[in-house]
Image (cartoon, grey):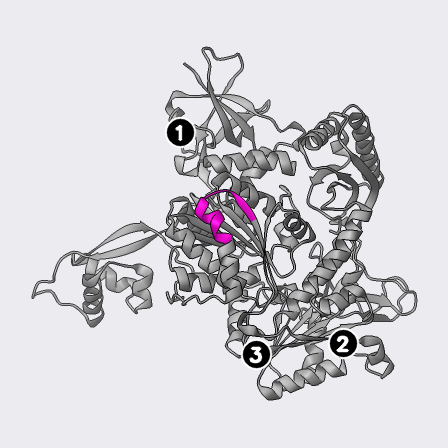
Amino acid sequence: MPYFAQAAVDSATIHFDKLYTYLVPEPLAEAVHPGSLVLVPFGRGNHPRMAVVLECTQQPEVPPRTKTVLDAAPDEARLTPDLLRLVYLLKERAFCTYYEAVKAIIPYGAQYRMAQSEDGTPRLQSQMERATENWYIAENAPEEAVRLGPKQKLALQMLQRHSMSETALETAGIHRAVLKGLLEKALIRQEKRWKAIDLYSEIPLQPEQIALTEEQQAAYEALMPAIEQGRGAAALLHGVTGSGKTLVFFKLIEQVLARGKTVMVLVPEISLTPQMILRLKKNFGKRVAVQHSALNHTERLLQWKMIQQGCVDIVVGTRSAVFTPLKNLGLIIMDEEQEHTYRSESSPRYDAHEIARWRAAYSNALVLFASATPSVESYYAAKTGRYQLVQMHRRYGGNPLPAVKLVDMRAELMRGNAGEISVELAQELQKNLLQGEQSILLLNRRGYRTVCACQDCGHVIKCQSCSVPMVYHKAQGHLMCHYCGKTLPLPSRCPQCGGTLRYTGFGTQKAEEELERLLPKARILRMDQDSTMAKNSHEKMLAAFAAGEYDILLGTQMVAKGLDFAKVSLVGVLGIDNLLFGQGFRAYENVFSLLTQVVGRGGRAELPGRALIQTTNPEHPVLQMAATQNYEAFFAQEIAFRKACLYPPFCAVCMVGFVGTNEASVVQAARQFSAILAQKAAKVPGVPLRVLGPAPYSVVMVNNKFRYKLTIKCRNDKAFRALIGAVIEEYGNQGLASKARVAVDMNSDGER
């Protein structure tokens, strides 16, 4: 009986993304199953296109004009049943195409593309062929008459103990010419083996004895029943900075592994992976795999293959690691769960929280969200019983929280200090230098100066492709747009009137220069997007700081959370005021979290901690609550605001974005989308919603494209998602997609 595949093709638009029926030829019948990646003819020209098979059926007859599958990827590339379910989940929840979901789930190196065979027929080819390397094995003992050089003798002795790769032999000083001579004498043989990359292999296995405090033990015991019972559950571990949440993680991981299950550990940023990887590798050895975007394609592919083949028990990584094909999941840990980086800002626009909850429920695992400053939504879910709430109120070892002081920068200016570093902060930094202690400074703006404007006519030099001022990067000697990356040589005069240009604002480069002037003997390490572009730069920089090679760590948000350095006793915060008045309903939450987290980097060992927050608004209640680390007071204020203004968790916010090259057309498309929504919503009773806009994004133009949005306050359920899906379909049917591309985001606060 003929065998058919229902497949979703690559490069489909969201308006016309559906399943197409293809006949599976007899030679491919054993290779095509739900989850298989296939090559199919598509469109009038029958152009070969990648597709994913979602269903397989058998029918007695082949319908007319049914096209035939051209090729299928190997079975190892097939999506597992739980990953295939995630494709459906992303399609329904993130409003993406089927194949966009596939690309999010499978790393680039494990994907396939169209190529041509020698006879010109289209076929599938892996995006990356798995790398091989030469291995050498001792074959025969040398006869007495055979003369060997010193290097050949050494190589043979090494290979007689065990086989070795060419890379390992070269590291030991045995080069290819030496091996060629031994091959010619038939003393060794060569074979090709898959290249295996053991990332962080230099980390020794040194399991630490985990001794929990009374409070940690109580948290561990509260969380264990869900693991012992093997039921899907969600919990929030809310512990002050430095309370030792990681030790609780490790104790839980031990128990999960002892039960033959696997663990996923998620961190919000690449900068946080080195310390977590170090501790996991030391405690659990080679059965730890890594997944994040700083790995090259080969490294990520080989790590993914290890996971797929069941060679690892623990995966640690950033947001996309939530899709790794771990089998038999027992525990998912999401550290610093409040961070916005867990929400994807490109299609598919998913929230890793939602994916983690789904995978935990599907696998009967525990998903553990953890933070000193949990998101308002997560804390509300815990307070209302949707999550189990476990709290730790004291720092590990009984250390007090850092003493925090707000420094009024208005008074500094009145005293004649126009710099970015207050007199008091400079004195505290000097004190730390003399005592041999380390300091961390947070400034969440990279570059040197943030605005270049004319003193005569007031013209601000903006990016020609984006509606934002260009930032002066002194180290690179140019102006740069932080949205599209475009650069310009430094202008000497105003391009509008020829007047004198003046640079204002300050970023990490300017702060570094000022620190060098104030503290000429200080060894300063700057960490921002500009200084961490090289491979493994995060690991190297943090390792150097931990080793005491630097006195001051100056950086953007990447230095604010998750880091643990015993000698850091002082934390300083610069330029926080601009974040207080940011767009989006999470603005205050972001400021409170950032301040609490960075202040918590100090005083984590024997040295007492202290922190200085520089501000022109020291009376601001959010700053006051952050200074006292009073999360409960902040939550009470914030939840009251959310309820009064109807924001999450009391509703969902659906952001519908419109992007196009003509501003008027984009606005018109947004209005027509709103009109279609109103028409269809009127026919579907019981779907509450409020529509605001259209309004421009805070940055209205990026890369020569205008951006507008509709903000919809709604209930994120099947009925609402079906309604939006119907509106998107009608939007496409009316030809509006040619005016503006539409994107739906259920997880945005409209800030970006």
Give left or right: position of 1 versus 94. left
Dot 2 amino acid type:
Glu
- Residue 154 seen in render: yes
Residue at 82%, 71% in the rendered image = 616
Q: Which residue was labeled with disc 2?
A: 420
Q: Is residue 497 magenta?
A: no
Judged from the image, the secondary structure of the residue bearing numbered disc 3 is: loop
Depth check: give the residue in front, 505 or 435: 435
Where is 198 relative to 623, above or below? above
Judged from the image, the secondary structure of the residue bearing numbered disc 1 is: loop
Question: Which quadrant is home to the N terminus?
Answer: top left
* CA distance for labels 1 and 2: 64 Å
* CA distance for labels 1 and 3: 56 Å
Numbered mark located on residue 550 in the image = 3
Numbered mark located on residue 31 in the image = 1
Spot the residue most to the left: 144
| Residue 147 in the image, given as x and y percentages of width and height | 13, 67
Residue at 51%, 53% in the rendered image = 223
Looking at the image, is mark 1 or mark 3 nearer the viewer?
A: 3
Dot 1 amino acid type:
Ala
| Residue 315 in the image, given as x and y percentages of width and height | 46, 52
Give left or right: position of 713 versus 382. right
Please identify the quarter of the rendering in which residue 146 is found.
bottom left
Q: Is residue 227 magenta?
A: yes
Bounds of the magenta segment: 223-234
